[in-house]
Image (cartoon, grey):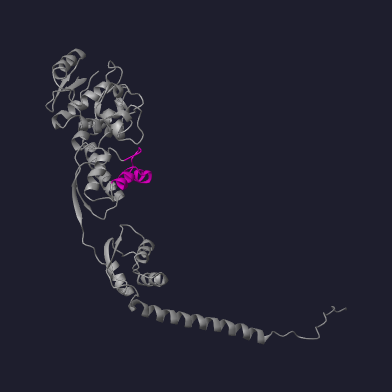
Amino acid sequence: MSRGVRKPRPWYKPRKSRRASRWALAVIVSLLLLAVLSARAGYKRLTGYPERPGQGSSDPITVTVPAGASFSEVLALLEEHEVIAPDEARAFKLFVLHRGAASKVTAGEHEFRGDMTPTQILDELQRRQPVQERRVTIPEGKHSVQIAQILAEAGLGGGEAQLLAAMRDPELLARLDIEGPSAEGYLFPDTYKFSTSASAAQIVERMVKRHHQVYAELRRGHSEGARSLAETLGWGDPEIVIMASLIEKETSQGAERPRIASVFINRLRFKSFKPKLLQTDPTIIYGCTVPERRSEACQQFEGRIRRIHLRDKDNPYNTYTHEGLPPGPISNPGRDALEAVLAPEKSRYLYFVSRNDGTHKFSKSVQEHEAAVNKYILGGAKGDGSVQK
């Protein structure tokens, strides 16, 4: 019986290098020791750093921290105003992060000195600011440019330019569920108290949210009216706001608003009324004064409507040359104007003309309207807001 062939054994046995392992272990231990010593030294420096005075001037330094500013932006302001030296910025940042205070900086004016300790600087950054508010009233029927002027004159929102930019900011409009190029029509007229540190976007957002709140209440209370407008004219919320903006500009008489709403709605609903022209002067004025791009005729507008403006087809807001509603609101309507659209008076009126005393004469036929025009227009000064065929 044959036996298997055995493999030959090596004549030597390899040994592991203990010297190399020892060297590797020594290097690792040394690195760890250096890291610990470095961290300990850094910790000692950091623990001593907060009470170390700065090397700057002892003169007062005022720094205004904007609302919503990030800590990096605040740190840049401190460097810019020489509250913190550039070579100390990283240490101050680590100190603030170690304290977990980066998000606790308050907006507003802060008083510093260049010789303050980091602890004193951080305490001042976290100091509760006295709330400064401005009370401002936005009247019904003002358009966006007028509202921006009112707010800017009250020292709010950073000025007219910033307020208008916020009113036209696509991202903000999308977040506020506004379809259109601006917040026109949704800046609810009311009396507000705004913080002087509130940004333009915060102011616009609050006014728009107030509109949504009031409009939602009205729509719930007049759901049948909203349904009727949707069925007969295909209107949704944007069209209701546009119509309310027209009514707001046509009269200051609250009792007349539902009747004026009925005139405009009748013109669009009645099949016998053609063309579907609303023929209201405030739409021309808006198109010639507010949009950034204006027609050639509007560039010649000097505050009074002339034939060139009545016949202007290049003004998209001209309801004498374009049927139906204008492309967007022409003012910011209040509660009564919005409610007038949702609950218009039931009438057969198709015309109205100013009596020159703040009220209007309403007519159902062309003949009746022409008689009123002869009496109130040809017999005296033409009143704003007359509706003529």
Q: Which residue lies furthest to the top in this view?
A: 367
**Quick one: quadrant of the C terminus?**
top left
Image quadrant where residue 116 sits: bottom left
**Quick one: quadrant of the N terminus?**
bottom right
* Residue 127 in picture, x, y percent from top left: 26, 67
Total numbered labels: 0
* Residue 326 visible in the current orientation: no
Q: Looking at this view, is 227 or 96 the one in front?
A: 96
Q: Looking at this view, is 23 or 152 the one in front?
A: 152
Image quadrant where residue 384 sits: top left
Above or below — where is 308 with respect to 217? above
| Residue 187 covered by magenta stretch | no
Q: Looking at this view, is 214 or 189 the one in front?
A: 189
Above or below — where is 89 with respect to 65? below
Task: Considering the whole magenta stretch, tell me its main secondary structure.
Answer: helix
* Residue 145 visible in the current orientation: yes
Q: Give, as a single range, the part of the protein colored magenta.
A: 160-182
Above or below — where is 202 with respect to 233? below
Q: Residue at x 55, y 84 (%)?
A: 30
285 to the left or right of 30? left
* Residue 19 in picture, x, y percent from top left: 66, 87
Q: Which residue lies furthest to the right in this view?
A: 1
160 to the left or right of 46? left
Q: Which residue lies furthest to the left in this view?
A: 357
Image quadrant where residue 326 sits: top left
* Residue 151 in picture, x, y percent from top left: 23, 46
* Residue 202 in picture, x, y percent from top left: 29, 50
